């Protein structure tokens, strides 16, 4: 391709220097990017891609107002809602297609949890809900009024925050998590002396992932939480959990949740071994096998904040498991308050 040579104009040395400077001038955005770490550059690229995709979606749909919450808060603590801490709604297995039934100790609440083709939602799938709960709670605490149940966040930011990989397979596993969360249904039956009520709820109503093109992994996730789950968050019935929660396996995560929920402000809390198995949502039939799994957890001692211990029991007595704080100062201080 040929270009016509422009007419030559007289120029001073100052003009020539200025022209040379403009030729080699680095744009402001590029200079800032050079000073960033690889992780920060990746986050910046993701934010720009999300902004571009968001503007494209808005231009296509032409909404009258913003109808979603962008979960992009950087400084936040991880939160879990009280209902999923109390009830064993998530399977500890990698794939569980069987219907799970659970009855509370007082026999007043009966749960039936069912999944779709991919099975029930797992403890690792729950990380998506923990991330949403944490971001929404941080926004509510900051004074932002939230009335819409739709949450939008960057896929890479979520994967890094929850200690997952960022390869292609990790994005596909995240999509499978969204499928299981959507297909998992919970039937709650409560009754007392006067009335009996049955209600079916779920975690999310729908989800969307958006990618730049057909060959790249998606960069943006949009989830519409169910009315039931969103109302739990709005009531701020949540507890803070350690970031180390995401480095645990499914069995250990559930143990930590039980410890966090029931120890609360106490120094320690005890429960019978068989009742603990029920509260865990474990499918281990033999109680001895479940006891061995608890002993393995005690030996490794990987739970954040808490330790477990078997209490001495004689013949014919119920085996008990004690949860207690690792921090000796906190343990002593809370023991004195009890």
Image: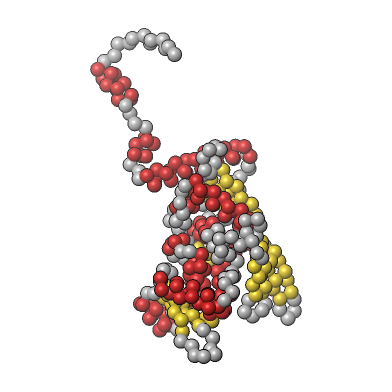
11 vs 76, left or right, is left
| Relative depth, front residue between 172 and 292 | 292
214 vs 329, left or right, is right
**Residue at 41% from the left image edge and 82% from the top image edge:** 335
Placement of 293 over or under 10, stated as above or below: below
Quarter of the view holding residue 121: bottom right
| Relative depth, front residue between 116 and 35 | 116
**Residue at 46% from the left image edge and 87% from the top image edge:** 312
Tell me how the rendering is colored.
secondary structure
| Relative depth, front residue between 24 and 201 | 201
Residue 291, how many percent across, how many down? 50, 77
Query: Which quarter of the figure is the C terminus placed in?
Result: bottom left
Q: Is residue 155 visible?
A: no
Query: Which quarter of the figure is the N terminus placed in?
Result: top left
Residue 284, how many percent across, how many down? 57, 72
| Relative depth, front residue between 128 and 35 | 128
**Residue at 44% from the left image edge and 65% from the top image edge:** 242
**Residue at 37% from the left image edge and 35% from the top image edge:** 30
């Amino acid at each position: 391709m040929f270009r016509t040579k422009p007419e030559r104009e007289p120029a001073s040395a100052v003009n020539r220097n200025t022209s040379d400077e403009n030729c080699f001038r680095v744009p402001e955005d590029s200079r800032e990017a050079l000073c960033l770490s690889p992780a920060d550059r990746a986050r910046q690229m993701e934010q720009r891609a999300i902004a571009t995709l968001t503007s494209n979606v808005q231009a296509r749909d032409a909404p009258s107002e913003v109808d979603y919450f962008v979960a992009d808060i950087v400084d936040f603590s991880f939160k879990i809602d009280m209902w999923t801490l109390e009830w064993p709604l998530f399977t500890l297995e990698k794939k569980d297609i069987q219907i799970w039934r659970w009855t509370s100790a007082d026999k007043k609440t009966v749960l039936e949890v069912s999944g779709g083709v991919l099975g029930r939602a797992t403890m690792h799938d729950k990380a998506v809900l923990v991330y949403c709960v944490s971001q929404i709670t941080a926004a509510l605490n900051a004074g932002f009024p939230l009335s819409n149940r739709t949450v939008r966040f960057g896929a890479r930011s979520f994967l890094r925050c929850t200690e997952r990989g960022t390869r292609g397979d990790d994005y596909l596993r995240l999509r499978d998590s969204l499928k299981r969360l959507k297909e998992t249904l919970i039937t709650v039956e409560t009754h007392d002396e006067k009335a009996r009520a049955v209600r079916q709820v779920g975690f999310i109503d729908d989800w969307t992932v958006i990618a730049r093109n057909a060959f790249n992994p998606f960069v943006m996730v949009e989830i519409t939480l169910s009315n039931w789950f969103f109302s739990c968050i709005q009531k701020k019935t949540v507890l803070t959990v350690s970031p180390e929660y995401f480095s645990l396996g499914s069995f250990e995560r559930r143990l930590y949740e039980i410890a966090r929920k029931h120890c609360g402000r106490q120094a320690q809390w005890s429960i019978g071994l068989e009742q603990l198995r029920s509260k865990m949502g474990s499918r281990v039939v033999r109680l001895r096998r479940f006891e061995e799994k608890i002993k393995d957890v005690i030996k490794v001692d990987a739970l954040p904040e808490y330790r477990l211990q078997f209490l001495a029991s004689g013949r014919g007595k119920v085996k008990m498991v004690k949860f207690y704080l690792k921090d000796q100062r906190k343990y002593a201080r809370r023991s004195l308050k009890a």
